[in-house]
Amino acid sequence: MSGTSADGIDAALVRCSFGSGDAIELLATRERPLTDELKAEIASLSHSGPGEIERLGVIDRELGRAFAGAVNALLAETGHSPTDIRAIGSHGQTLRHRPPSAGNEIPFTLQVGDPSTIAELTGISVVADFRRRDIAAGGEGAPLAPAFHAAAFASDGANRAVVNIGGIANVTLLRGRELVGGYDTGPGNTLLDYWVLRHEGLHFDKDGAWSAEGSVHPPLLDALLADAYFTQVGPRSTGKEAFNPQWLDQHLAEAQGVAPQDVQATLAELTARSIASAILAADISIDEVFVCGGGARNTDLMRRLYQHLDGKRLEDTSAVGMAPEWVEAAAFAWLAHQTLEQLAGNAPVVTGAHGLRVLGGVYPSGFTVGT
């Protein structure tokens, strides 16, 4: 998994067992940083520019090698061989996401990280390209994690929201064991990371310490929350195409003189309030909220979120059995398992697809020579 923030590769070793005792076990993990050169090229290719096709072909192979390296390192650390592993579920790196909810006449989504290269360098079959089948079926292609959240975290008699705060934030709504909804809520960490890098030279605001020093600027917050995305209903998804530095700079141009740490505090408040509003506006009354993704470790962000949740129980997903940093990677291992078992991986109630679909393509580990 490499998310919207493009800060590194998360590799997770997962056992999925189904039958009389269903279980999703997170066995081992490894984080592999992306090089500054790869990060810069990912950022550059996230918008139109010269030589895109040539550069796309190169970064597709480079990321494939990087993903394979993360897998091989994890196997070496755990003493496993490729024959121990049924498949690699590779989300890839999103470069573009143009969903139907954003008014795109021909919606598409693009993730890179060549699965053939991964299979070749690891000797393990790869399941990849999960999102495009849901798009082809009329869906948003995102978020895909809610189906996994339901499998991993749903509980009889409890109305739960599972919130993933990555670069973009999304929420999953569970009524007991029933998945009743889910959608991207807007920016998660992406603007916070951009702003602290620009002003403090840091890749992220550890514990939200810098945002905690600032004060929310109400006119700026109101302007940010006035974006049409926050009033959309039904299946919806978004990305850096909508919430990016240019979007923020346009608003800052109309709110000149705001101190940098106050902008950071306002961005944290934007993330917290947009998540909380989505939960409180749900068709079911939520009892408890569990947070995963990098945002779960942002103390200031979690504090702000709790303040807007009307006293609902708020914890990270370690309280229900999985460390928050690894939920998204585990989700794509589970999605690969679904694909290999010819089981649906999407949730039409979330994405708006025409129906359940088996997601992704399979890239076998070996080859057969015949006559």
Image (tube, rainbow, N blue to C red):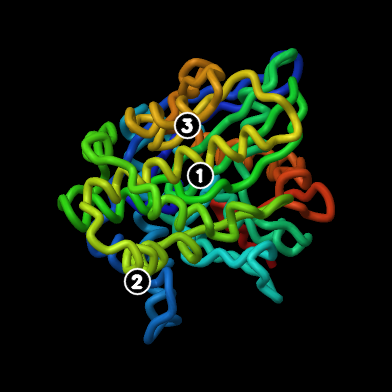
Relative side of 269 to 280, left or right: left
Residue farthest right in this picture? 355
Asked if the residues shown at circle 3 and circle 1 are in contact, with their CB atoms under 8 angstroms apart, the answer is no
Q: Quadrant of residue 363?
A: bottom right
The x and y percentages for residue 290 are: 53, 25
Residue at horizontal 69 percent and vertical 16 percent from the top: 158
Q: Secondary structure at mark 2?
A: helix
How many numbered markers are drawn?
3
Label 2 or label 3, whichever comes before in sequence order: 2
Label 1 or label 2, whichever comes before in sequence order: 2
Q: Which residue is mark 2?
A: 44
**Does residue 27 appear in this view?**
no
Asked if the residues shown at circle 2 and circle 3 are in contact, with their CB atoms under 8 angstroms apart, the answer is no
> Of the residues tagged 3 and 1, which is closer to the observer?
1
Residue at horizontal 45 percent and vertical 43 percent from the top: 271
Q: Which residue is mark 1?
A: 169
Q: Which mark is residue 292?
A: 3
